[in-house]
Amino acid sequence: MRPAVLLLAIAALAEATPADDGRTELTPDEVRTAIQRGLDFLLKDQNPDGSWGGPRNAVYTFTGAVWSNPETHRSWKVATTGLGCLAMLEVGNSEATETAADRAIGYLLKNAAVKRPNEWDTMNNWAYIYGLQALAAACGQPRYADSPRRDEMRAVGQELLRKLAYHQSLNGGWGYLEFDAPRTAQPQWATSFMTAAAVVALLEARAQGFDVDEALLQRALRGIRRCRLPSGAYTYSIPAIADPRHSEWIDQIKGSLGRIQLCNLALLMAGDDIPLDRLKTGLGYLFRHHRFLDIARNRPIPHEAYYLNSGYFYLFGHYYAARLIERLPPEDRGAFWPRLQYEIIKIQQADGSMWDYDMHAYHKPYGVAFGLLALGPSLGEPEAEREPAPTP
């Protein structure tokens, strides 16, 4: 590693490790304060055009060195803006956050239908997923029921659905890169977690009356089901046949911590009969083995940590864990909320942001958006339900 990069990594790690007073449970007021600080950060960080993020503040890390295609940055910017918009819509609590959501929607309407960057880069799929999810959420908000932009929101959402259909891989899912040769217009590689994130967006869009192709959805669900291993982990890529070997590989439980909850969530939302014990066991794995996500967080090179974990698994995984906890029976939710709150709020920075992987100007807004979307629903739990999180 170059000396400058090493110093940057050390500084980033120091910034991202706040003082710890030894507590692992937070009061509701502390959670509300963290949420407000995150909202204040997003309001301050929003670009003049209504977006969040951008190709600035680049350093010589893996991301800064490899990705310079303008269309890749457009994809990341749309995805980050979709997440920021979701946070404003679902966690926002003021006129200022409503205005921020309006501005973000305006940006998405003009920019969400990005192009595929090149033959090996399919980051455009992130833009389609979170752009669609944000527009679907907006259509579900009463204050947009009579909006003059409602028809345009639905039209752009349908365009994103068409683009997702065009870029669905041969194995039924979606990925962010394309490795296999020969190159084809239709991608051949897909991941379990991007496919599951797409399924969540597709189902939420369908719930708001968008026309979602059932065949497309079922192909994606079959792909996710093929990823599940007997251990309860999900493989990183969508395979023809899942392979449970490789004892220290990313497909083991400790390398799957950021995917297990999301894949279970997507299948559950789609109607699969997943036993409650399996859901609780997956959440138990997250907190029992959480140190492997902690070790990977803020590392500058993807997949360099144990079990090939990457820093950007952290907040992504906690967001979908929160979505899954919401779907547990009320008597089971309180066992998990305190630990989830702690693991998110412990990384909040002095400026109110949360981040897990240095990535131009995207990581703080996408990170705090994921964090807010996870923390928001956690405040609805009565204190009496809170018990220590079980471990399998």
Image (cartoon, rainbow, N blue to C red):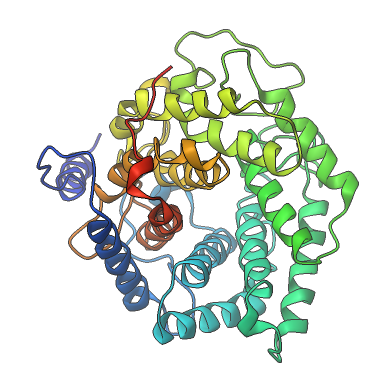
Q: Is residue 14 left or right of residue 27?
A: left
Give x and y (percent) for residue 277. 57, 23
- Residue 88 versus residue 71: which sits nearer the camera? 88
Q: Is residue 134 left or right of residue 188?
A: left
Q: Is residue 392 left or right of residue 139?
A: left
Give x and y (percent) for residue 239. 71, 23
- Residue 145 versus residue 13: which sits nearer the camera? 145
- Residue 379 versus residue 89: which sits nearer the camera? 379
Q: Is residue 175 visible?
A: no
Residue 204 figure quarter: bottom right
Q: Is residue 190 left or right of residue 61?
A: right
State the residue lying farthest toward the bottom.
Answer: 148
Quadrant showing the C terminus: top left
**Residue at image x 70%, y 37%?**
267
**Residue at image x 17%, y 44%?**
17
State the residue lying farthest toward the front.
Answer: 384
Query: Against 301, is 52 above or below?
Result: below
Residue 34 figure quarter: bottom left
Query: Against 224, is 380 above or below?
Result: below
Give x and y (percent) for residue 32. 29, 63
Quadrant showing the N terminus: top left
Give x and y (percent) for residue 115. 69, 62
**Residue at image x 30%, y 42%?**
343
Q: Is residue 40 visible?
A: yes
